[in-house]
Image: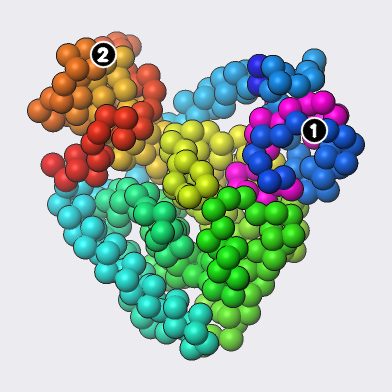
């Protein structure tokens, strides 16, 4: 049985199933470990990890700790209470039309970003006007349809993660900034900051960046210096706004002071830094890496809400969930009827009831001619069909983006 335990109650003999960090910054080489002695417990406390999940089937129990099932039920209840808000239209063209343009834009932006950042790696100055052009093109795409570019950035080749992660964070920052009704200049600065948030990694040893597994404690301490390196690069660059630099400097800070590099708390962290922290974690966890599988977007959103109890901004996390939807566009879902489909639009009445494009019928064991099921259109109080879970697209041998273009 999995239980959520405060780290001050850990003791040798407990088996840690999940460090509940959201990123690979715990002091162990593996993500699941048996705590052998007091030194292992002290390592966790020194890294200021507040809560972990233990597996009582593989180690000692913690009698008064809540089960993971109970924690999940509480989080799901909180998520389900969030109601869509009526805002001005964030879509001027259909998803299918913008997806095709967004594919070309993403390819061009990836190549251009790689050239621009590789030049910095070789000691050249950052070309700020070209960075702004990339951000401006992405902003135009997001204005046409908020879901097209964002849904595509979740699809990453493991070897291209560094550049596509930067583009994804920028696109998500732009899209989320529009949801928050930020002004055009603020959205531009947030987008630029998102694109450059990890620029300090250009100063990191390649063997660390390309390591096919978690970092050792010493390696992680080296990797954490990428924030200071990035801050230095941007402050030496003409034309970068202070608010954009805050994205780089603050995206690893946490509200309870457990982040780095400065251990800032609460309002000491800029609003852009708080936004970037949420976006950075979301994209990192929903992306496949050489050392970890991608986590379903819905599960990551649950984690973000759980972590907003301590180190992420609660109101911003709730707005991010409202913006993305509990089942973000491009998510593969299973309906109670046995249909496997792709979410193509958020529901008007409930985050639980998006528009789903049917792809596969598990009862007939065959692909179907795609058709749309609007789960929000059923009469109030009736549940003719509903989402019962998320699925991995590869299990059904199709690519979700194919069905976003129709």
Question: Which quarter of the image is occupied by the N terminus?
Answer: top right
Which label sits on residue 337? 2
Q: Quadrant of residue 163?
A: bottom left
Q: Is residue 335 above or below residue 232?
A: above
| Res. 374 image quadrant | top left
Tell me the SS state at disc 2. Answer: loop
Q: Please identify the quadrant where the C terminus is shown.
A: top left
Assess disc 1: are there few (<14), some (14-19) or many (≥20) residues with their C-alpha within 10 Å of its C-alpha: some
Q: Residue at x 62, y 18 (%)?
A: 70
Q: Nearer the viewer, residue 264 or 341?
A: 341
Q: Residue at x 31, y 23 (%)?
A: 334
Q: Report the side of 307 relative to 76 (left or right).
A: right
Q: Secondary structure at mark 1?
A: loop
Name the disc covering residue 77, or none.
none
235 and 83: which is toward the camera: 235
Q: Is 102 one of the magenta-colored residues?
A: no
Q: CA distance from mark 1 to mark 2?
A: 44 Å
- Determine if the magenta segment contains residue 18: yes
Question: Residue 35 got which mark?
Answer: 1
Does residue 346 sit above or below 259 in this rendering? above
Question: Is residue 391 visible to the viewer in this orientation of the structure?
Answer: yes
Q: Is residue 176 above or below residue 371?
A: below
Instruction: Residue 326: give x, y in percent of width and height.
Output: 42, 33
Mark toward the start of the polypeptide (1 vs 2) = 1
| Residue under the image location 69 percent in, 41 percent down | 310
Q: Nearer the viewer, mark 1 or mark 2?
A: 1
In this orientation, does residue 349 appear?
no
| Percent of width and height locating residue 3 | 69, 22
Q: Residue 335 or 393: which is nearer the viewer?
A: 393
Q: Is residue 215 above or below residue 59?
A: below
Q: Is residue 225 shown left or right of residue 279?
A: right
Q: Which residues are magenta?
A: 4-27
């Amino acid at each position: 049985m999995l239980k959520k335990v405060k780290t001050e109650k850990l003791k040798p003999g407990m088996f840690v199933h999940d460090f509940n960090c959201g990123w690979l910054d715990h002091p162990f080489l593996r993500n699941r470990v048996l705590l052998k002695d007091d030194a292992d417990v002290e390592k966790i406390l020194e890294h200021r990890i507040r809560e972990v999940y233990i597996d009582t089937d593989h180690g000692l129990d913690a009698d008064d700790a809540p089960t993971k099932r109970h924690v999940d039920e509480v989080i799901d209840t909180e998520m389900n209470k969030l109601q869509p808000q009526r805002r001005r239209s964030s879509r001027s063209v259909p998803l299918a039309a913008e997806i095709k343009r967004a594919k070309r834009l993403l390819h061009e932006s990836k190549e251009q970003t790689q050239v621009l950042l590789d030049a910095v790696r070789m000691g050249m100055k950052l070309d700020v006007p070209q960075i702004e052009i990339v951000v401006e093109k992405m902003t135009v795409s997001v204005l046409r349809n908020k879901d097209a570019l964002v849904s595509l950035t979740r699809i990453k080749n493991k070897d291209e993660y560094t550049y596509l992660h930067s583009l994804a964070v920028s696109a998500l920052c732009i899209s989320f900034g529009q949801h928050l009704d930020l002004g055009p200049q603020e959205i531009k600065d947030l987008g630029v900051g998102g694109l450059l948030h990890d620029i300090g990694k250009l100063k990191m040893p390649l063997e660390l960046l390309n390591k096919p597994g978690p970092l050792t404690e010493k390696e992680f301490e080296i990797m954490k210096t990428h924030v200071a390196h990035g801050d230095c690069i941007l402050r030496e660059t003409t034309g970068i706004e202070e608010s954009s630099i805050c994205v780089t400097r603050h995206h690893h800070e946490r509200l309870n002071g457990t982040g780095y590099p400065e251990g800032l708390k609460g309002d000491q962290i800029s609003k852009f830094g708080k936004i970037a922290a949420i976006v950075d974690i979301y994209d990192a966890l929903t992306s496949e890496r050489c050392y970890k599988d991608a986590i379903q977007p819905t599960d990551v959103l649950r984690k973000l809400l759980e972590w907003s109890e301590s180190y992420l901004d609660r109101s911003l996390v709730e707005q991010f969930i409202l913006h993305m939807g509990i089942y973000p566009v491009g998510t593969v879902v299973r309906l109670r009827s046995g249909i496997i489909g792709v979410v193509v639009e958020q529901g008007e009445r409930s985050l639980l009831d998006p528009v789903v494009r049917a792809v596969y019928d598990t009862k007939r064991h065959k692909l179907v001619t795609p058709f749309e099921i609007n789960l929000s259109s059923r009469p109030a109080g009736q549940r003719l069909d509903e989402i019962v879970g998320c699925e991995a697209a590869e299990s059904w041998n199709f690519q979700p983006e194919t069905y976003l273009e129709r």
